[in-house]
Amino acid sequence: MKKGDHLFLIDGSGFIFRAFHAIPPLNRKSDGLPVNAVSGFCNMLWKLLTDARDTSVGVTPTHLAVIFDYSSTTFRKEIYPEYKANRSAPPEDLVPQFGLIRHATRAFNLPCIETEGFEADDIIATYARAAEAIGADVTIVSSDKDLMQLVTPNVHMYDAMKDKQIGIPDVIEKWGVTPDKMIDLQAMTGDSTDNVPGIPGIGPKTAAQLLEEFGDLETLLARAGEIKQVKRRENIIANAELARISRKLVELRTNVPLDMALDQLTLEKQDGAKLIAFLKAMEFTTLTRRVAEACDCDAAAIEPAAVPVEWGEEARGPDLDKGDAATEQKAAASETANTEVSDKQDLEGNKPSELARTRAEAFASHPIDRTRYVTIRDIATLQAWIAEARETGLVAFDTETTSLDPMQAELVGVSLALQDNRTSPASAMIKAAYVPLAHKTGVGDLLGGGHAENQIPMGEALSALKDLLEDPSVLKIAQNLKYDYLVMKRHGIVIQSFDDTMLMSYVLDAGKGNHGMDGLSEKWLGHTPIAYKDVAGSGKSAVTFDLVDIDKATAYAAEDADVTLRLWLVLKPRLVAEGLTRIYERLERPLVPVLAEMEERGITVDRQILSRLSGELAQKAAAAEDEVYELAGERFNIGSPKQLGDILFGKLGLPGGSKTKTGQWSTSAQVLEDLAAEGAPLPRKIVDWRQLTKLKSTYTDALPGYIHPVTKRVHTGYSLASTTTGRLSSSEPNLQNIPVRTAEGRKIRTAFISTPGHKLLSADYSQIELRVLAHVADIPQLRQAFADGVDIHAMTASEMFGVPVEGMPSEVRRRAKAINFGIIYGISAFGLANQLGIERSEAGDYIKKYFERFPGIKDYMESTKAFAREHGYVETIFGRRAHYPEIKSSNPSMRAFNERAAINAPIQGSAADIIRRAMIKIEPALAAAGLAEQVRMLLQVHDELIFEVEDGAIDKVLPVIVSTMEQAAMPAISMRVPLKVDARAAQNWDEAH
DNA sequence: CCCCAACCGTA
DNA sequence: GTACGGTTGGGGG
């Protein structure tokens, strides 16, 4: 072997397990012998031997060996007798395949290597290092994390089942550490399948974080006293020795005595007849035919080989850690394709944080070049792009449509961006294209223009795109994917495997401005994309995108995909570096399809009811208006606070209350109520008029305009990334602010109805934010009260004022309730005084008293503020961050405002996280109960979920929903306070609530 | 035509 | 005192 050679080391035991679980066991020989793993193994080998160049490895091997485990009694047992002690017997159908795979290896004329006392991984490690020392390149065919410690610039891994190369950046992105730190990481996290103990309570994320901070395990153990988290510190100190043993278990030996020298692994010519004989025995007809073609043999003339099958115990060497189906599935599910950045040229960053920077710099030297964009006008070219996306496993994707409303939008074209691996440096080169599908000609033409020429027919293009978008092995990257998801879903395409750069930015930087593409592009790429209005015009002259010239459309649309891919390359490693991957993957990304489906379903709103209410409101408002003019002595625009102020405080000379920030007299409801209390009749009428006109204009008049012409339902849009705390927001229409507090307002809710044969089911969390407060601040009395299910505000009042709960005056309870809410909002004496209509000094006394009774609350507030000042953000109980960059402002009121917001955010945000988790879990929970078909989740209103349920299924559905919601924090967080959910079903939203 | 302030609906 | 979005009036361009 010499410099420049390429050695392939195949982890035979690992592959067989992986293939066994990945390939359906349908694949049996006619006599019933299961051969699915053997089949996968043979196909993979053939592919690598004949056209490895066409896989993502991209090179042809000069040397190759298949390595197996010999037995499970290795030196590791001596270090730690419990090593792999908990493994279970392999599945019955797998047992005979171990022997068959060794036969297969020999049939391929390949070295079949195993050494007693050592695991396959140690042999692989030894060969890899030896080859590397000579200057050869190495590809380890395996996706086992235990081998990732071997990855270097010259040693790659290759996941044959996903056709994915794993290099340094991939290890970093998956585990948050460089490959050389993998040993330390595994030593800390342990491995349940191998029974490697590790340090209890330390998972991959924590381990990566600690390694980023301390450098390596030994340093960490030496300086463990510096760790702030008490429990973590104690765990690490107590288990230091266990960690050291674990390290010995996971560190691979690179000095295993080798039976075959590297030179003996030279790839030999195939013996076609021998291979075909084996393949025929296995009844692999397709592969037999291919091999026969390739070696120009007559397969029919070759007799199947006699292959002995070992069913029994003596079948050697299953390496069970690779065989834990649950582990494998989890890995496959959590790993939605990692970056495919090739690092052949550049040794990209040693830390994820540096990777983000390195890439941003790479983009600076390869700025966006719109002249390179292409317009795809024929199906063959589109197919070629799709094939390339399959190779790289990564594609940025964007749709162009006729509307911002995904329920109305007509698809006009799609754009794609790919990493171009043939250019160098690979990390910086991206190619992008636009596929026009429904552009029209003749803008300004009276006939409205016809279909533009040279566009791929919509159906043909969609069918090709469907294969790509639904392929789980290709990661689709989009900005605000929910939009594209809905548009494509309406065309029968359900996007699988995706990332959303908007959501990544949101998870990283909530509270630091918007997460729109143009802003992110400026911020991370220093590039200003073409403005939409420069392409489609604005205002009266604006046209829909189908009327945009295709060349202009290409520049605009392809750029969007290009920018999106570049953003992803920068944001993905940042997510890892900041330890936020989990939040993104568990709390953010899974909500995209959930919300998209809620938006798509919509809810029925009864036009007649609203119309009748509008009439009633119009009459009442007109009557109120007349009375206002009567009392004012003249007609004026009541809706103008300016004119109203002139009447009230000028003409009538009523005492003005507060002023607005522009110096106008305030005419707020609060001010008017105060004036009414003084006995003036006009202010009361104004308040009434305002309520009536508000209900009419915002709700009864506006809602019918949102009824979709086809579905006849109202489809709100949810924004996942527009609040600082993690709440959703709803718009067009906003269905999170439908009136409920007044009887008049509640009538509007009666217009939200279920479809025939169904009921609306409303399930809402009771006092969720106070419960979260009791949990995070750990207040014994509050915890007890919630555990006992008593009236929380009455309990608070009783504690503070010494009044027994029995027979408590409602005013006393009201004050306690206001204080409880005030606490959640980051209380101030000013605000509380305002709320209760008392003196500021009195409010201050209440707060003081409250802090005396519940000192933990004060502690929580102070420590939250200190945390916010130190880090610039606060965290929810699940680790979501809300940033407050102005928390150190020199402006006292600005600073105080930020402090209150920072105190509120973990409470509001944790509650938001809990309901997010519930929303993600609901569908699977219902499906598990066999009820998925009878229920549709329609709306979310911060602490409430509204479902449409088939009449007959309500009794079964209700408990599933209630318990899913109540258990939603588990298992991530075990709440110190129970969560309580109330649920009810009725014909309309008013009665259900 | 666009933007802001004021106001008010929800949790 | 926290977090939103929608409507209206009104001013500036």
Image: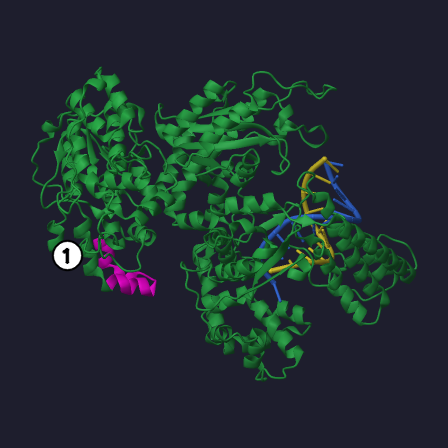
Chain colours: A green, B yellow, C blue
How many labels, in total? 1
x, y percent for residue A400 = 57, 30
Answer whether residue A638 is visible to the viewer in this image.
no
Image-based side of A965 in relation to A845, left or right: left
Question: Which residue occupies 50% across, 59% down?
Answer: A960
Q: Mark 1 belongs to which subunit?
A: A
Q: Main secondary structure of the magenta part?
A: helix
Q: Above or below — where is A32 with respect to A674?
A: above
Residue found at x 43% / y 50%: A586
Q: Nearer the viewer, residue A896 or A244?
A: A244
| Residue A833 placement (x, y as % from top left) | 65, 71
Residue drawn 87% across and 57% down?
A: A625
Is residue A814 inside the magenta stretch? Answer: no
Pick the quarter of the image with the C terminus of chain A.
bottom right
Q: Is residue A965 above or below residue A547?
A: below
What residue range appears in magenta? Answer: A217-237
In this view of the protein, can residue A195 be seen by the observer? yes
As helix, strand or loop, the secondary structure at mark 1 comes to loop
x then y, percent, for residue A868? 46, 58
Residue A230 among magenta residues: yes
Foreground of the two, A572 or A518: A572
The residue to which callout 1 is attached is A80
Q: Is residue A450 above or below residue A879?
A: above
Mark 1 surroundings: few (<14), some (14-19) or many (≥20) residues within 10 A: some
